[in-house]
Image: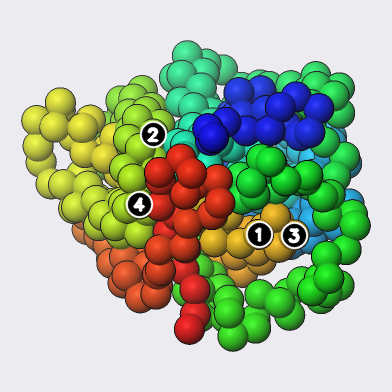
Amino acid sequence: MTSTPAKSGTGPRPGPAVALGLVILCIEGYDLFILGAVGPSLLAHPDWDVTKSTLGLLGSLTALGMPLGSIAAGWAGDLYGRRLPMVVSLVWLSLSMLLSAVAGDLTLFAATRFLTGMGIGALIPLVTAYVSEAATPARHALQVGTATTGLAIGGIITGVIGRTLLPEGDFRTLFLFGVIPLVLVPVVWRLVPAVVRDHAARNPSEPSRPLAEPEPDASANRLGQLLTPQYRRATLLFWAATFAGLVIVYGASTWLPTLMVDSGYDLSSSLEFSIAFNAGAVIGTIGAALIADRGLLKVATMVSFLLAAAAMITLSTPQPRPLLLVASAVAGFGALGTQALVNIYVAHAHPARLRGTALGFSLGVGRIGAIVGPSYLAAVTVLISSSKAGFYAFVVPAFLGAALIGSLRTVRRPSTTAAQAGTPSEAPLAP
């Protein structure tokens, strides 16, 4: 028996699911990295009086909306299916970006960034869960990881557009591109199933059962299930690791171009480093996912955290430009790629009936790191005058994340289909 997914008609197929997930997260990545791209332009705005502390606050406000979106969407996705929450989130995100484009003052602009954060927070757990359920068991990490590279690809697009239009053009123009998600609404409605079916963890010879039909041991209190002895240790470690990872992701997405400018590079050069950062995330995530599918998900995630620390240290020192671009690419993998691996780990460790909730709460609680990250970087750069300080600030959460993932207890727990495919399934379980 092969490891191919269920046939058409029983659930989402891997190819279309990965493609749709990649496109959605590409748009989301654009919305995420846009603040970093326009950061230098905001600092130079003649009327808004934006300081480095203000820029950090804007990044934190964006992140502040994310826990609300993540938790609500993850829970709603498990309860009502992925389709409706995904459509609502896409519409919400588009309207929020449109409001950012027309904001006439800093206060309104800050409010729209909070609303944008809610949309960003909602889509990541929904898309990750959707692709995870469609993924071929033997290629689970690769297929989910490929979809999540959309975040980095969106960041690359942000950098390219920013480098083309800024600093001469009006930074508000960049936010108008955020309305594009509206065209995906009919596509999502057609491709995403109305109910959740777990094709990645069941025997294809067995009939699938939508989660709308309660399982014998299912409980309405899904958070309570995540905190039972079976999942409690892994749940808490995932929350903490996500916190550390998102400090790096959102600190870098908000501050990397500005840190490069402070180090003596012009805006165009700093955006080139941002493009390299995201390109590294794409290539690194796919490579790490291939390794993870060989039963090394834990090792791949730990190493990616450590690579983030090494890359940031390298970026803080005078190096030849090609080496700095490579270091920026490695930093991108260490930030976005690491968080993609953590999300894959969470999805892989839970059954479909808990997957959306597990991802939602992991990202929701971990979003405290996204809230803290930009302001943490702002505080370090303000309190320590050295241009290296901002880069070194990333090392602490990187080492913390590696230690937390290393603390996960794992067992070889092959699913039926994975075992038939000859691929071991690594999942964190509390004894």
Mark drawn on residue 286 = 2
Instruction: Provide the residue designation for mark 3.
Output: 353
Q: Which label lies toward us, 4 or 2?
A: 4
Residue found at x 60% / y 23% = 15
Q: Find residue 398 and report its horizontal and vertical position in percent.
A: 32, 62
- Distance between the alpha carbons at the discs numbered 2 and 3: 27 Å
Residue found at x 65% / y 81% = 227
Amino acid identity at mark 4:
Gly
N-term mark: 1 or 2: 2
Corner quadrant of residue 73: bottom right
Give the secondary structure at mark 2.
helix
Mark drawn on residue 295 = 4
Residue found at x 71% / y 27% = 7
Amino acid identity at mark 3:
Arg
- Distance between the alpha carbons at the discs numbered 3 and 4: 23 Å
Q: Measured along the vertical axis of the image, is residue 420 above or below residue 176?
A: below
- Distance between the alpha carbons at the discs numbered 4 and 1: 18 Å
Give the secondary structure at mark 1.
loop
Residue found at x 9% / y 37% = 319
Q: Measured along the vertical axis of the image, is residue 250 above or below residue 291?
A: below
Q: Measured along the vertical axis of the image, is residue 313 above or below residue 430?
A: above
Q: Are marks 1 and 3 in contact (CB under 8 Å)?
A: yes
- Please state which of residues 62 and 149 is positioned toward the viewer in this rendering: 149
- Distance between the alpha carbons at the discs numbered 1 and 3: 6 Å
Q: Measured along the vertical axis of the image, is residue 369 above or below residue 98?
A: below
Q: Is residue 344 left or right of residue 184?
A: left
Q: Find residue 293 and report its horizontal and vertical position in percent.
A: 39, 44
